[in-house]
Image (cartoon, helix red, strand yellow):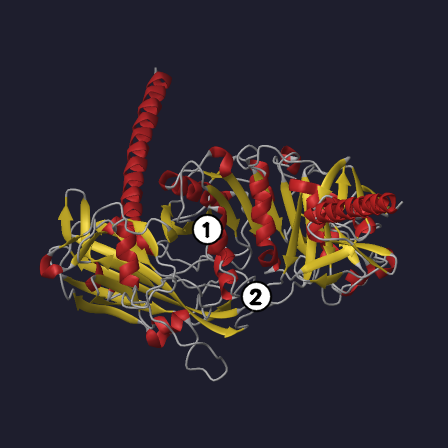
Amino acid sequence: MIMIIIIIMRRITVKYLMKHMLVTMVLFGLADLAVHTKTQAEELPEHSYVDFSSDRSTWFFRTDGGDRSTAFFDFFSPFDPTVKVEGYDPLTSYELEHRYYFGEDDALMVHIEDMKKMYDPYFDYTMEEDTLRVRHTAFDKLLTSGIGERSTTIQYTKKVWDLSIDLSEAEGTYDYREFQPVEGGRNKGAVKPDELNEEAGLTGKSFTLSSGSIEQKEEGVYVPLASLMEWMGKTSFEEQGYLTVQSEGVADVTASVDRPDVEVSDVVVPKPSNIWQGGEDETYTWADYMKDVEDGERQTGWLWQSFHVASDASFKDEDGDPVHVKADRIVPFSLYVPSTYDPEKTRLTFMLHGGTGNEHTPTYRLMKEGIPVETYAEEYNYILLSPNGWTQNPVWREKQALYSVERSLAEALQQFPVPDDHLFITGNSLGGRGTLEIAARFPDRFQAMAATAPKITDRAPEGGTMVNIEGTDYDLSAVKDLPALIVQGTADTTTSFKVQIGSGESPGSIVSSVMPKLENARYMTVENGDHSYSYAAVLEPIFDFFEDQLTEENAEAADTAVLYKESARAAANGEQVKLDQNTEVVNGTLMVALSSVKELYKASADVYPIHLYDSDSEQPADYWTLVVNNQTMNITPGEEAYRLNMERYKEDAKVTRSGAPSDEDQLDASPVFTEAPYEKNGELYVPAEEVLTALGLDVTIREENVWQKYRAFWGSGAAVIVFALIGGWVIFRKRSASKSESNQRKQA
């Protein structure tokens, strides 16, 4: 009996204790949840510098009309804030999700979510009952060394504003923190300031909005843009129908000024009244440009657009699998639309930038050197699309950069559709690598690709180099039949000719990883071409190459040819051909004009006088490139040596990375002509038999017989006159003889 009572008491006690323990745990859990929620509401994220390849200092909002959903922003390079874009002033449009309006005191009111996206990833906010709390972070940049070079050193100063605003009043308090400057720059690691500048900090300072107030509407909270941002390091003014909101000390953002050790051009402070570069009218302002774009008056020419990318966007890794990465920022892209745009005829090509680039680099670098790339877009009727690769050293095949490629194309085609078979892609350096990788990822999307100076090697962890376009689920073999043009400069020390081509004993990355996989490729070498500008010398060959793919029939080169000495007569595959110029004989060598070679090869041949980017295009070409089918030959006037395709010779061993060992003993000397090519009357004459044989044409050189030599004469009007004179003379002689005989008979 006693045992039964003990057991019952134990069960009651255990049940009671368990019940009370459960209640206690729930209460503690709820309390912890409440504390966590409160803590989360009070804390806003702390930001380190997020690397991105395009930056801005100023926003423009139209005040005298428009749809009130479009804003514009300027551009400066985050890698080198002293860089000035030449040839145009990029003013990028951005479509807000909510229309802005003018509230109390005519304050321009912007939805708080739109404001967050404008300044993402450095703008955060939270609502706590009747209080709006905002945190805004900014990074001032000062270039300390390497001005104008590929790798700069920049001093970053982090500034943080924390505002607490009473929603019922147009006032609040703010804290300000400033951190000690830290050094960074391209390829110099993450920028993470952590030491406060105690002397610069402020705490609990009261402020009042100078105009407008916080307004709560059904669709959300609206804030007075200018009067709110003036408490977070921004200044504002209005002119020519635009409210301008920009970073304080914008001159220090866009250039290093007032420093004796740095020489830069005068700083152009972004404002609507500036004269817009790119316009023919010297009175055409930034405000005029922005209004024309917004009102639809400007639908061709230079257009810059953007879109916001959130961290929950659909990103993919290098194998095409979903992956989560941080984003949260506005991403711009550059667009040039030709004046002859026709949705059924116009083509579109990507122009991907490299490691130190951004959406403007593929075009403004050319324009800086006096090469107006838009003239090619107009002549060939191409839309030029340059997306932003997100960060320094972009990897176009994955994540944010890949998203930028796909999204910018979708945005462009929505407004300016082109036929599906009129899409092309090109890029330089890492953009060249991106060209190969994007084409491999989307093998049915493009008609052709052109990769210039493709950076397809990285430093291997164990030393040496490794090819970076292999090892994913997407391989170049997927586009083995896609027409491809690969371009490389011999004076390139970034993707050096040695690393790209190598030697017979040690093949380079292009030879080992590209040539075996692309079965329909053309390889073109730029003599003395450097890394950043080699593609400037071959823009015409690139666009011609693209155009060739849209031709229904490509004529094949002749298999056999006959040339006659000192004659314009020739034959190709047994058919007579009239050459543009007579052949010439020099020291026993038959010389033929390159234009005549083109006549032999018909539509399958092209001849290009090549000018390097820094040479005078009005002067004779630096050298000439002959293209026949997918074979190329570089020929320099006055020099016997020539180059086939992308072969590397002993002479090229002298150009390599500083300190790299020479492999001259592993290379053959360049092939040479028996007679040096020469220019005459704008034509380049080359040794006919050697050139045609090297390009795979069976050629025969012959002497013309008398009939052949003078057949043109015999077939001309002059021959008729001669025959008439001879005939007349014969008739005269016969008549004279007949008359003489008659006289003799009479005398007899």
Figure check: 561 above or below 90? above
Choose the circle earlier in sequence order: 1 or 2.
2
Instruction: Return the residue nearer the eye: 449 or 184.
Output: 449
Q: Whole-Å distance between the Cαs marked 1 and 2?
A: 31 Å
Q: Position of residue 204 (x, y in %)?
A: 23, 68
Is 581 left, or right, of 170 in this rendering? right
Instruction: Return the residue nearer the eye: 382 or 594.
Output: 594
Is 122 left, or right, of 472 in this rendering? left
Where, by quadrant of the figure, is residue 484 drawn? Answer: top right
Circle 1 sits in a helix, a strand or a loop, which is it? helix
Q: Position of residue 221 (x, y in %)?
A: 19, 49
Q: Tell me the mark number nearer the camera, choosing from 1 and 2.
A: 1
Q: Residue at x 40, y 52 (%)?
A: 332
Residue type indicated by callout 2:
Arg
Circle 2 sits in a helix, a strand or a loop, which is it? loop
Which mark, by number, is residue 150?
Answer: 2
Q: Residue at x 42, y 36 (%)?
A: 344
Residue type indicated by callout 1:
Glu
Which mark, by number, is residue 378?
Answer: 1
Figure check: 689 above or below 142? above
Is 82 left, or right, of 429 in this rendering? left
Q: Position of residue 487 (x, y in %)?
A: 65, 51
Mark 1 vs 2: CB contact within 8 A: no
Where, by quadrant of the figure, is residue 173 drawn? Answer: bottom left
Instruction: Return the residue nearer the eye: 125 or 522.
Output: 522
Outermost residue on the bottom side: it is 260
Crowd rating for badge 1 (residues with CA inside 10 Å; few <14, some 14–19, many 20+): some
Crowd rating for badge 2 (residues with CA inside 10 Å; few <14, some 14–19, many 20+): few
Q: Quadrant of the N terminus?
A: top left
